[in-house]
Image (tube, grey):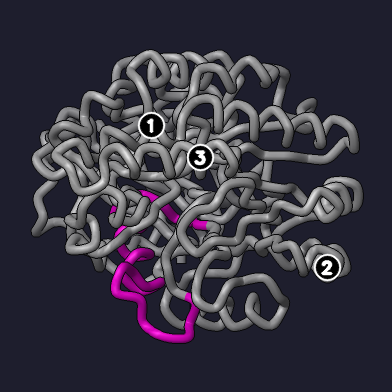
Amino acid sequence: MKTLIHNATIVNEGRIFVGSVVIDGDKIVEVFEKSDGSDYSEFSEILEAEGCLLLPGVIDTHVHFRDGGQSENPAGTFYSESRAALAGGVTSVIDMPNTVPQTTTLEALEAKEALAARDSAVNYGFMLGATNDNIADLLRLDPTRYAAIKLFLGSSTGNMLVNSADQLDLLFREARKLIVAHCEQEEIIQANLRNFKLEYQGTVGETAALHPQIRNTEACFLATYHAIERARKYGTRLHVAHLSTATELSLLSNFDLDKKHVTAEVTPNHLWFDDRDYAELGNRIKCNPAIKSNDDRLALWAGLEDGLIDTIATDHAPHPLEAKRRRYFDAPSGIPSIQHSLQMMLEPAIGNKELLTMVVQKMSHNPALLFGIEGRGFIRPGYKADLVLVRPGVEETVTRESLLYKCGWSPLEGQTFHTRIERVFLNGSDTTTTSATAQSLSFSK
C-alpha cells in the first residue's frame, strides 16, 4: 500500500523545497521535488499537503517517562507520556534509567523493553544508568542493546549519583558507548542548600527563585569541566546533557559533528524561560540544572546557532501538580514539555530558513547520528517513514484540557503558538487516521 504526501514544503538536510514523499509500508521509498507529472493512480492514498511543512519526526533523546514497569507512577507512564509525545510530533524517544526499579542491569532493560512494546505510542530506546557499583557489568554488555550510558554527576530525581573517582576513570577509559552526563558539582550544591535553608526555610523568601542560586553557574561549570577533562584524557565520547549556562559554552567546540568526541544538548525550557519567570511560574519551572538568567538563555541560543550545542532534547520530567505546589525546598524538580517542544522551537523559526533548518538538524538529524539510531531522523529513501506535517500561521493556545500528560499540567498553559501539528506519520502510518505500531530503535556500535 503506497501513500503520497504531495506538494509539502520539505525541510531536510539543510534544504527547504516544495516536493513530495512516497511511503510504502513503514519506509520512505521516494522523495522528489515539485510535481513530476506522474500518473498517481498507483497510490492508495494521496495527501495534499500544500502550505504545510514536512519534517522528519523529532527524536527526543532525553525523556523521563517515569515508568519502570513495577507499579504505576502518579507522575507519568509510558502509555500517557508517549501519546503526549506523538501529539507534539515526537516519533522516537530515549528514556532515562532513574525509574523504579532503576535501569542499571540487562534484566531491568529487558523489562522496560517489554513495557514499551506493550504501551508505547512512539518508537523507543533506553539508556542504562551508571552507579558506583555496576560499571564493570555495564562495560561487558552488548553496546547495540542500548542507546548510551547515563551518568549522574549531580544528584537528581531518583538519585544515581556516581562519585567514585576510580569507577569514573574505569568508565571513561573502557566505555565503548556514548556517555551522557548530568553535570552539576554535588559538593557546591549541598553547601549552598545548607546555607539557603538556614536563611530562608519557612520564610516568605523560600521560593523557586532560590533554585539558580543553589544549583548555580559554578556548580555546572566545574562539573562539566571535570567531565570533559576526563573525556579528553581517555578519548571518550561524552555528551553533556541540558546545558544551562553561558560559561559552559567556553568548554565546547563547533567542529562538525563527526569530528567531535565531546558534544552537548540543550532543552527547549532553558531556551524559553529565564529567572524572571520564577515570579509567575515558581516550582513549575523548577528543574535540574536550574533555569538561569536571560543572558544565559541568549548565550545558549547563540551556542545552538554557532554549532557549539548539537542536540535539542526535552528532559521531559513530569510530577503531580500537588507535589509542585509544595514549598520550594520540598517540591520536586522537573518539567513536562514533550507535547509542545517542537512548537516551542518552531515559534521563532517560521520564516527564518537558517533557524528552521537548524531546528530540524538539532531535533532529528543530529540525535540520529550521535546516538547511532539506524534508519531514522532524515527524509531519505530507505529510511523509516517517521514524519511530521506542521501547518504554520495557525494559532493554537495551550490549555489544560488539551494536555495529554498524566500529571495534567504545563508551565506553557495560556501560551499561544503560531503553528499546528497537522499529522504525524509513525513507521508509515498516519496516526490521525489509523493505529500505528511503535518499534524498538536499532543502535549501531
Task: Please name the residue shown 17% across and 39% down the image.
Answer: 281
Identify the residue at the far front of this view. 198
**Residue, disc 2:** 142
- Which residue has dot 3 on it? 191
Decide: is 187 above or below 143.
Answer: above
> Which badge, 1 or 2, is on the more N-terminal residue?
2
- Mark 1 vs mark 2: in front: 1
- Residue 133 x, y percent position in the rendering: 77, 68
Which quadrant, please, contains the C terminus?
bottom right
Element type at marker 1? Answer: helix
Asked if the magenta segment contains residue 77, the reply would be yes
Q: Are marks 1 and 3 in contact (CB under 8 Å)?
A: no
Contact between labelled residues 3 and 2, with CB atoms less than 8 Å apart = no
Q: Up-down: is 64 above or below 202?
A: below
Left or right: residue 86 versus residue 221 is: left
Q: CA distance from mark 1 to mark 3?
A: 14 Å
State which region is magenta: 68-93
Q: As rendered, which of 375 and 201 lies closer to the eye?
A: 201
The picture places residue 257, in percent across and down from the top left corner, at: 70, 28
Q: Position of residue 249 (x, y in %)?
A: 59, 19
x%, y% of residue 80? 31, 70
Confirm whether residue 7 shows in the render. no
Q: Which mark is residue 212?
A: 1
Q: How far apart are the alpha carbons under marks 1 and 2?
A: 39 Å
Q: Name the amino acid, label 1.
A: Pro
Mark 2 or 3: in front is 3
